[in-house]
Amino acid sequence: MHLSSTSIAAGSYIGLDYAEPGVGGQNISPQLSWTPGPDGTASYAVTCFDPDAPTGSGWWHWVVTDIPAEVTSLAEGAALPSGARTWINDYGYPGWGGPWPPPGPAHHYEFRVVAVSVERLDVDDDASCASARLTLSFSSLDDADFTALFANPAS
């Protein structure tokens, strides 16, 4: 599998439009596209994680599961495909939560797509994001990722 974006190039800096309003952004979700998963792929999941967040456990910016197997891209700023579920991010709301690191060095943002062996994760809609991610790990067939950077403009 291969993951790419027309919004954010791998290894580059994330544009301010995709960041949280607290740092001057518009919190627009980035475009992502991926090559199909292996035989047996029944759905996909997409995540974005900041391992540099000063929390001791990083920061989850986006967790989307149950993306239908025939879907291999998400449009910039668009609604999710029918059937997909988005989980509460570490900001406390569902959906894309763009970068908003504290002032200082740039943070790394790890975007990942996962090919999943089931159409729908066996997780209640009101479950935690951590529960969804754990359940996802049991059904993963393959994945692809890229990392981009963002630094607080006040740095």
Image (cartoon, rainbow, N blue to C red):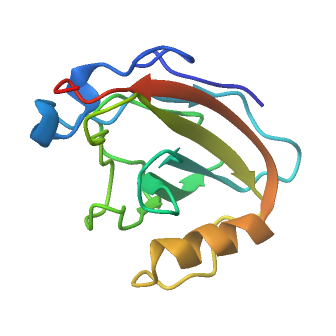
Judge from the rendering whether residue 100 lies leftward or rightward of residue 82; answer left or right.
left
Check the image and name the residue furthest to the right. Answer: 39
Residue 21 spot, x, y in % from top left:
11, 39
Front residue of 114/54: it is: 54
Residue 27 spot, x, y in % from top left:
21, 38
The answer to whether residue 88 is above or below residue 106 is below
Front residue of 79/3: it is: 3
Q: How many marks?
A: 0
Residue at image coords 23%, 23%: 16
Front residue of 66/55: it is: 55
Task: Examine the rendering and report whether any part of residue 122 can be seen.
Answer: yes
- Image quarter of residue 70: top right
Front residue of 22/75: it is: 22
Task: Examine the rendering and report whether any part of residue 70 can be seen.
Answer: no
The answer to whether residue 103 is above or below residue 134 is above
Residue 63 spot, x, y in % from top left:
48, 56
Quadrant of the rendering where the N terminus is positioned: top right
Residue at image coords 50%, 63%: 56
Residue at image coords 45%, 25%: 149
Residue 44 spot, x, y in % from top left:
63, 50
The answer to whether residue 125 is above or below residue 64 is below
Residue at image coords 36%, 61%: 89
Quadrant of the rendering where the C terminus is positioned: top left
Judge from the rendering whether residue 89 lies leftward or rightward of residue 11; answer left or right.
left
The answer to whether residue 67 is above or below residue 72 is below
Judge from the rendering whether residue 137 lies leftward or rightward of residue 16; answer left or right.
right
